[in-house]
Amino acid sequence: MKTPIYLDNNAATPLDPRVLEEMLPTLKEHFGNPASSTHRFGWAADELVSVARERVASAIGAAPDTIVFTGSASEANNLAIKGLAFAALRSRSAARRIVSVVSEHRSVLEPLDELRAFGFEVKSLPVNGSGELSSENLKDALTPNTLLVSVMLANNEVGALNDVNAAAALSHSAGALFHCDAVQAFGKIRLDLPATSADFVTLSAHKIYGPKGIGCLYIRRPQANQIFALVHGGGHEGGYHAGTLNVPGIVGFGKAAELAAGGLVGEREKLEQLSERLMLCLRSELTGVQLNGPELNRLPGNLNIAFDGVDNARLLRLLSGKVALSTSSACSSKNAAPSHVLQALGFGVQRQKSSVRIGIGRFNTVEEIDFAAAAIIEAVKNIRRG
Ligand code: PLP
């Protein structure tokens, strides 16, 4: 067993060796530009991109021409939100309201904040103490001038799940478009997009054992002028995203998506069993262990736990040689900012400062979970002894 045990799979997942295998030829012989239509190097790269696009689309029950590759999920979120907003400004549409949720990822919240300066009215809905959005609150927030509603499927910090089917239906009945950040849910919860009827969905490769720096936006009905591109140039990706395609990233994303869709049921069960085992171990040996987020019906593999009276920074330092965990999302933990998600759940500073996020993934074993549990128990006891 190799230590430290990696339990931060909500921040990034390790590359699956089968994904790496598929990517390697794109870094060697298949280096061509997929937009080069005059020789076989370009044709080969273009074919690889087509296969990958089909794989990503089929993993979510969508058609290949609905997938726009982007440089990250952050970029896909920005493309959906700012792209729609700027297109609405250009067409002088009266739809100037956007509704979202306080616990969304920063790559949703920040573009929304920026849009206020362009005359958009942004309504951020609260969540309950488990991190879930109420349909009633959403219904009340919808007005005839609502352009877009953006609700994540699974929260990246506390694992809360939202009923995005219901949210999409409510949004549509008010005449608004619906965007869903499904980055964390992809590969763990079945996404059947024709059924959810989301208009836009954001996905990322590096949360499903693919490479970093590649994401996509699913666009249900690609239409001219509906989205204002963030990057203009050579008309790549149907004009939604200019720039020579990241062929290795796209190929890796395609393989990772295929594997995620193929192993969905078994993987979900495994993640749930390992999470339950870890939680049971901690609760059997320690008092004052609180689960942040829902007790049931949460993102498989995600745990967010507060240890009463324990400073999370000290805990992570004590554990650093044995277990790799985080205090919140990767972006917030780098800035040492308080978690806006834990705040949204109504937790004060004390609870926030005693909370850690645990992300169990595909390659973790029972042995690793038992080792991690023992290490956490020992460290918590040490800190509590003072
Ligand atoms: N949305 C959610 C829910 C996430 O968890 C993340 C990454 O942590 C992102 C968006 C951003 O993904 P990327 O790193 O591909 O920009």
Image (cartoon, rainbow, N blue to C red):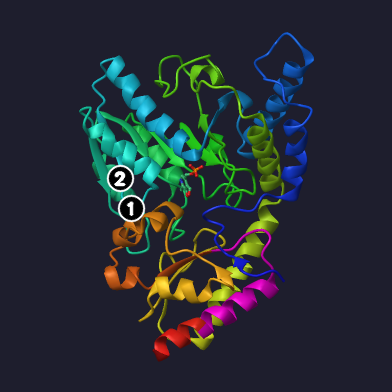
Q: Please tell me whether residue 290 is drawn above or below residue 40 in the rendered image.
A: below
Disc marking residue 138: 2
Which residue shows up at 65% across the image and 16% down it? 35
Q: For the residue marked with disc 1, what is the amino acid?
A: Ser
Q: Position of residue 383 (x, y in %)?
A: 42, 84
Viewer-side residue, 368 vs 319: 319
Viewport quadrant of the N terminus:
bottom right
Q: Please tell me whether residue 28 is drawn above or below residue 125 in the rendered image.
A: above
Compared across the picture, whether 348 is left or right of 212 comes to left
Q: Which residues are magenta?
A: 359-378
Q: For the residue marked with disc 2, what is the amino acid?
A: Leu
Q: Residue beneath label 1, please?
A: 134
Q: Position of residue 267 (x, y in %)?
A: 67, 57
Q: Are marks 1 and 2 in contact (CB under 8 Å)?
A: yes
Magenta run includes residue 357: no
- How far is mark 1 from mark 2, CA to CA? 7 Å
Identify the main secondary structure in magenta. helix
Compared across the picture, whether 80 is left or right of 247 comes to left
Which residue shows up at 59% across the image and 73% down it? 322
Viewer-side residue, 333 vs 363: 333
Viewport quadrant of the C terminus:
bottom left
